[in-house]
Amino acid sequence: MPGPYRETDLTEKVEAFLSDLKRGGSGTGPLRGSAETARETTALLRRITAQVRWSSAGDLMEVIRKEGRRMSAAQPSETTVGNMIRRVLKIIREEYARSRGSSEEADQQESLHKLLTSGGLSEENFRQYFTALKANVIEAINELLTELEGTTDNIAMQALEHIHSNEVIMTIGRSRTVEAFLKDAARKRKFHVIVAECAPFCQGHEMATSLSKDGIETTVITDAAIFAVMSRVNKVIIGTQTVLANGGLRAVNGTHTLALAAKHHSTPLIVCAPMFKLSPQFPNEEDTFHKFVSPHEVLPFTEGEILSKVNVHCPVFDYVPPELITLFISNIGGHAPSYIYRLMSELYHPEDHEL
Amino acid sequence: MADDVTGSHVTIPHGQKSKTFKSTSEAVVVNTHTVFSVVKRLPEHIQVDDPDVLKKLAKKLERQQIPRRLDYGYKVSLFSHLLQYSRKAPLTQQLSIPSAVIHPAIVRLGLQYSQGIVAGSNARSIALLHAFKQVISDYTTPSNEELSRDLVNKLKPYISFLNQCRPLSASMGNAIKYIKKEISNIPSQFKEDDAKKKLLNCIECFIEEKIVLAAKAIAKSSIEKINDGDVILVYGCSSLVNHILCEAFEKGRKFRVIVVDSRPRLEGREALRRLVQKGISCTYVLISAVSYILPEVSKVFLGAHALLANGYVMSRVGTSQIALVAKAFNVPVLVCCETYKFCERVQTDSFVSNELDDPDDLIVTRKGETQLKDWQQVPRLGLLNLVYDVTPPDFVDLVITDLGMIPCTSVPVVLRVKNVDLL
């Protein structure tokens, strides 16, 4: 295929992806789940690696960073896009280091000893050309894609270790990961699930119908009844949109209340989150943390006489501090919230935290 | 020797020393010196899982010629001891018109209760008292009967009927106790007209003192707690809290209000309308956004349905959640409650005694799709629509009543003082 055609085809695909991202973030439930977004992002990055002309690893990283910045800017709240880009950048660094023959450890670890002895930043500019680099990078990205395919199943396989029979489990809103988790446990055990509906989008209703069709005893409650019902709940299992660098969560609104109620009753709070949701952001950016959608969901336009005189807020996300969380279950096993920072340093390179 | 056990207080009818009730654990011999006893009859609406109780209730209703309202829909197993009605099947459909047994004002009241047209503990009590005023003015004593005994017997089927339409609230229970006491205390030499006038006067006094003047007193105390520049959070629609905020605004305090609302009742919209009409600047959010908005808030004002004898606050479902989150953010929580809503019951969780509303209210249509439309067909799906919940006293910082500002733990003291007065 001649070069220019491939380029326009690629730009078309990127533009289509960007407009999808922009549209999908209207908050009325994602048009696609995070897993799908992660897969599409990675596939797109693989295509970019294959089709764009680059000579050294540094060029490739520049291209990916540029495209990555555009993609993150299209929908800032969809952090999986940024996470996948950082993973791919790390893959490129690793493959480059392997091609050069030096071990990855020496390049990346910022131990105190290294800081004292080496003095000054590592002079790595990724300018060397290796013939096999392209193939290696694409192969590594393919491995990443395979890992992404299997995340939900890997998490669901751990379900029987955490759910015993005749339990009462509480969850909020709709998470495909938690749904698969509970359905896997329901094949062997009998338990009861209480779903908080999570107004105003009421995604809990979908979750409840889906679970009950699989034979799980389900009850739908309103958000206001979360504390009232919590005393009879044995475990709280939730999904999340993002896992932040300090071990906290950015989850659907209402989750902080749920976490506080669980803490008050000393009920364990388990978060099912695949690794691609781990993001190197911290929660102290006040302006960018919250996302709001149309207040029409909360106070509809039929209440027109008072609409003009009141402020209406409809935030989509909540911050849950790491002290309220008991356990994270991810596709590589279970972790405490205090371990998240370590996992992050293995997934992303510190220089990539800012794209 | 009598057991002097502190517990719920019940007026033992004069002349009876001991009474065995079927649903309590033991009979206690009470001598006239001790004020407290342990025996208490459980209300039937929290014993729906006991078939004997249901049979007795059915017989009683048949005797009083009142139709019985049937349960609706699949009940969550934790709540099988409570009743769950559907709003589409009000009790009045089963009554013949004109009803021979039940006064039309009571029938109308029952319908208003079951459809939710009259809601809120103050509104329900006032409506009840007005209906009773109507009943008393239309009442004529039959020959060979005494007004003080016959009128009480006439009121019993009305109360059963209202109970079937919607379980009585604590405030209504206290109002009914007061009326029955007043009626029984009518001396027998009073002429019928005088007696009726006295009773109507008593009811007027009750409403005036316990509800209207109490609201004024509470507003006066609360205004001291509202400072300029405050951001006040309120939940749902409490007539008392709305009154306080309007009074404070008229007195010239500068504050703004955040109204928190929850599905499916969405009562906060009514509160929002009233406050906006007065000109108070308001913000409106749903209860799931409470942790987002709470850092801006300086105080939380909550209304109460009843205050229980162990210091727990019984209020609209969601109140305990707001108090919990407010405590986590160190925001003071103030509960406003008149003393006539104080109740001798004790309760520690929201399960044993609650009200289940129509489960179909949870169904919502979004973007043309109704997810839970056929929930009755799905075998393992249940919808739970709770009406009340209890807030533990450690979440509440202050209770503002017409007797002053007291901590939550002083509620049994107030009850004891009130009961000593009554005796």
Image (cartoon, coloured by chain):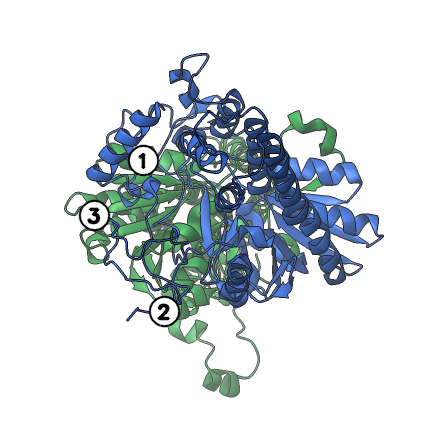
Q: Quadrant of the C terminus of chain A?
A: bottom right
- Left or right placement of residue A295 versus residue B364 in this view: right
Task: Give the farthest residue toward the left.
Answer: A188
The amino acid on which the numbered mark 1 sits, given as a three-letter code, is Gly
Separation (CA) of disc 3 from disc 2 = 46 Å
Of callouts 3 and 2, the N-terminal one: 2
Residue occupied by mark 2: A101
Of residues A171 and B412, which is closer to you in this image?
A: B412
Separation (CA) of disc 3 from disc 1 = 20 Å
- Same chain for the residues under marks 2 and 1 in the image: no
Image x and y of residue A301, in percent: 66, 27
Classify residue B268 by image quadrant.
Answer: top right
Q: Colour of chain B?
A: blue
Separation (CA) of disc 2 from disc 1 = 62 Å
Report helix, strand or loop for mark 2.
loop
Image x and y of residue A275, in percent: 37, 55
Residue B232 lies, with reference to residue B237, above or below; the image says below
Circle 1 Cα neighbour tier, 10 Å, few/some/many (<14 / 14–19 / ≥20): many
Residue occupied by mark 3: A185
Residue occupied by mark 1: B382
Evaluate whether residue A346 shows in this view: yes
Circle 3 Cα neighbour tier, 10 Å, few/some/many (<14 / 14–19 / ≥20): many
Q: Which chain is mark 1 on? A: B
- Left or right placement of residue A107 versus residue B108 in this view: left
Task: Give the farthest residue toward the right.
Answer: B252
Q: Colour of chain A?
A: green
The amino acid on which the numbered mark 3 sits, given as a three-letter code, is Ala
**Tags 2 and 1 touching, CB below 8 Å:** no
Task: Give the farthest residue toward the top.
Answer: B97
Of residues A109 and B323, which is closer to you in this image?
A: B323
Circle 2 Cα neighbour tier, 10 Å, few/some/many (<14 / 14–19 / ≥20): few
